[in-house]
Every structure is written in structure tokens, then in C-alpha cells.
Amino acid sequence: MRTYRKFGAIMALAIMMVITAACGNSGDSTKTNNGSTTTTTNAQNTNNNNSSSDKKITLGFAQVGAESGWRTANTKSIQESAEAAGFELKFSDAQQKQENQIKAIRSYIQQKVDVIAFSPVVESGWDTVLKEAKDANIPVILVDRAVDSKDESLYLSFIGSDFVEEGRKAGRWLVEQFQDASETINIVELQGTTGSAPANDRKAGFEEIIKENANLQVIASQTGDFTRAKGKEVMQAFLKAHKDIDVLYAHNDDMALGAIQAIEAAGLKPGEDIIIISVDAVKDGMIAASEGKINFIVECNPMLGPQLMEMVKDVVDGVEIPRRVATEEATFTSEEALEALPTRAY
Ligand code: AHR
């Protein structure tokens, strides 16, 4: 009996030592985030000291809206990957309004989700709500679009495309097409949502490249809010105001597709009378390209769900994650679009 009691006491002590060591380890396993956000990640470890295998992970995702084919594919990717990962996904659609996204993020904070992810509709104005998430020890991951916050400890990572490079790719193709031009080439530009990262960056990247050739002149530039309806409406106005448009640069396929309707209604041939460049490479855009109505598409990959779920799992498990995950993307001429179409997933 005495032997049993002694053995029991030794076992109890051993168990306590193991528990103490485990707690100590969890407190020490700081996620570095490239060394820049130690405080956030320490706090996050305290908040989520369950590993992903212990309990169902809750992810709050504040989506921009449903403005384009790209967005629809992106939403599907996020919802399907969350389900495949076994996460509980709280999903909201902000209908392209920043105040709706802020409300959704606040509600995720109140609900104490494990991780918040969102695609910011515009770049500015996020510091207050991101600080609230930080104070609640809830890690934030930016998906698709970035914010312009100076305080980088307000979010853990950013997964998405390099929008400036996308604009440059569009510009490089155009410069090459018109390298021998001896007269002015009139370009009209359909910008994405005003103040959004893709609109700002695609414009900047394109301008950076086309200034190499003084013949390439943007004669009109206006937002089409990334939608087909607005793309059509603004293109109608461009066509009324300018009789000599040579090139349309649209920041996404949907606006280009709307513009094509306007061009055809004006009795012109898209892709011939007006050269068209767009961004995204979603199914409808690729079909238009394969028909020669869009001449060049820069791909922007919406399938960000799997990468996001991997990252969320790592965050909860206290695994170090990269500060920036860039998406790999291609470009398509009409011929290349025709070839790629049969195997295109979105
Ligand atoms: O942020 C990505 C952009 O948003 C896509 O290019 C556009 O189609 C979407 O609405």
C-alpha cells in the first residue's frame, strides 16, 4: 500500500512537471512574423493556446462584395477551402462599402473568432478597427488587397497579387505593340474602385511603363468600380467624348466586358478598332480574348483559399508565417487564351 502511495505521489509530481513545461513552452514559442510583430504574436499565442488539432478553428472573413467574376471565384475558393480544412467560417459580404467591412470585423472581435481575414475594399482608414482586433489578441491576415497602415504590427501577413507588377505587364505589352508608332496613340482607362489597392497600383504600374514612349497618351481615365454595368456606362461616355480612341486599358475583365458592349453598340469592333487590355483572366474574359475581342489579359489569381487556410492553421499552431505571400500569375494573348480555356478552372 505504502509503495502504491509513493508511486502515486511520484506520478503526480511527474505529471505536474510535464504540464508546467508544456505551459512554459507555449508561452515562449513566439511567432516572429519576420521579427516585426512580436507583441501581437505573443498575445495571439496567449489567446489561441489551443493547437489547431484540439478544437474547431473559427475564421471570420470580411469579403469586399460580389462586384466581379473574380470576386465570385475568390469567395468560392475561400468557402470551399474553409470547409475542406474543417474550419467554422463566419463570412460577410460588404457590398463594396468600407463601413460594412468595419462592422463585420467588429462583430468577429465580439464573437472572439480565432483569426480574422479580410480583403480591404480601400487602402486607407483601417487603423482603428485593426487596433481593436490587436487589443483583443485576434490575429489579422490581409487577403487579396493591402492596407496603407504605417503600423505593421496591426496585421500578421498579406497574401495576394503584386498589383503594380500587373499594371507593368499591361504597359509592357502595349509599349511593344506600338514601338514603331509615329503618331499619338489615344488610350482610355477604366479604373477599379476608387481608393482600392488594385486601382491605385494597376494605374501606377501601367503609367510607369508607358511613359517610355511619348506617343502613348492616356486621354481619359475614370472609375468603373470593377463592375460590368459601370464599365459599359463609362465607356459609352468615353466614346461620346472622344472620336479617336485607339486603346482601352481596363483594370479588370468585367469592366472590359461592359465596355465591349458599349463599343459594339457604337458600331465598332472591339479588339480591332479599339485594342483592349484587361486584368484578371476569369472565364468570361478569357472567352472574349479567345474571340479576339480582348487583345491581352494580365492574370490575377483569385484562388487564395487554400493558402489562407494553411496560414490560419499555422497561426493557431504558433508556427512562424511569412509576412508576405505573393501569388504567381501569367499573361494571355488571344491565341494563348484560346489554348488555355479548356482547362481554365474559373
Ligand atoms: O482585388 C482584386 C480585384 O477586385 C480584381 O481584379 C477585380 O476583378 C476585383 O473586383
Image (tube, rainbow, N blue to C red):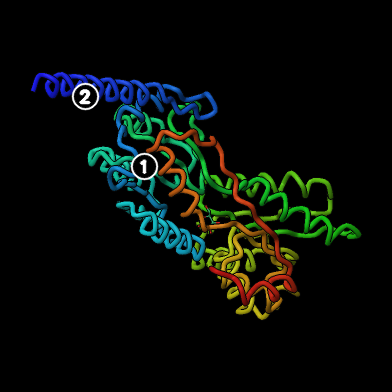
10 Å neighbourhood of mark 1: few (<14), some, or many (≥20)? many
Residue 277, by quadrant, is: bottom right
Ligand 1 contact, mark 1 (Cβ < 8 Å)? no
Indicate which disc residue 52 carries.
none
Pick the front one: 211 or 309: 309
Could you say where residue 336 lies in the image, as x and y percent from the top left?
A: 73, 70
Q: Please, what secondary structure does the residue beneath circle 2 have?
A: helix
User: Is residue 291 at all visible to an observer of this figure?
Assistant: yes
**Crowdedness near tag 2: few (<14), some (14–19) or many (≥20) residues, C-alpha within 10 Å:** few
As displayed, is residue 106 above or below residue 334? Answer: above
Q: Which residue position is annotated with label 1?
A: 116
Please give the residue where the numbered disc 2 appears in the rendered image.
Answer: 11
Q: Quadrant of the N terminus?
A: top left
| Residue 79 on image: x %, y % | 38, 59
First reached walking from the N terminus: tag 1 or tag 2:
2
Q: Residue at x 45, y 63 (%)?
A: 72
User: Quick check: 282 above or below 45?
Assistant: below
x and y, in percent, of residue 25 in the image: 37, 23
Residue type, numbered disc 2: Met
The answer to whether one can see residue 195 in this image is no
Give the spatial CA distance, label 1 vs label 2: 41 Å
Tell me which residue sits at (53%, 24%) in the image. 35
* Secondary structure type for disc 1: strand
Question: Quadrant of the rendered structure where residue 181 is?
Answer: bottom right
Say which residue appears at 83% left-offset and 62% top-offset: 177
Q: Position of residue 274 (x, y in %)?
A: 72, 70
